Amino acid sequence: MTREEAFEKVNGIFRDNFDDESITVTDETTADDIEDWDSLEHINLIAAIENRFGMKFTMGEVVSMKNVGEMVDIILSRI
């Protein structure tokens, strides 16, 4: 899977999770960039991404992710 394909899938998850078709995530996207991205939505988002990619993030990975780009890097390292 290419980085672009991973971003396309992650972007779809963000749009579904936040019910907002206008969302377009980039490497630098953080919770500050999406209005409804709070701690509860973060948990839902992580679970949706794990389910979509058939993987589980470690707690250390979840805590250390600073942006969507780092999340995609972890996903790509696992598949």
Image (cartoon, rainbow, N blue to C red):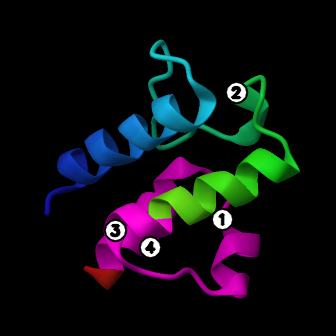
- Tell me residue 52's x, y (percent): 36, 61
Q: Which residue is mark 1?
A: 65
Q: Tell me what residue is drawn at x 38 percent, y 70 percent.
A: 75
**Residue 51 sits above or below residue 6 on the image:** below
- Name the kind of residue labelled 2 in the image: Ile
Q: Quarter of the image for the C terminus: give it.
A: bottom left
| Secondary structure of residue under mark 4 | helix
Count neighbours of disc 4 (C-alpha within 10 A) and say few if under 14, some if 14 to 19, many if 20 or more.
some
Q: Does the magenta portion include 32?
A: no
Quarter of the figure that contains the N terminus: bottom left
Outermost residue toward the top in this view: 22
User: Residue placed at 43% from the left, 67% from the top?
Assistant: 51
Q: Which residues are magenta?
A: 50-77
Cα distance in 3D space between marks 2 and 1 = 16 Å
Give the quarter of the image for residue 13: top left
Horizontal arrangement in the rendering, residue 46 relative to residue 9 (left or right): right
Q: Quick check: marks 3 and 4 in contact, CB under 8 Å?
A: no
Residue on which the image places disc 4: 74
Inspect the magenta stretch and tell me whether residue 61 lies in it. yes
- Which label was assigned to residue 34? 2
Can you give x and y, in whole percent of width and height, for residue 53 in the image? 34, 68
Q: Which residue is mark 3?
A: 53
Disc 4 and disc 1: Cα gap in Å?
A: 9 Å
Query: Magenta part mainly helix, strand or loop?
Result: helix
Which tag, 3 or 4, sits closer to the chain's start? 3
Instruction: Kindly state the secondary structure of the residue where label 2 is placed.
Output: loop
Q: Is residue 2 left or right of residue 11?
A: left
* Near-viewer residue (4 or 20): 20
| SS type, badge 3 | helix
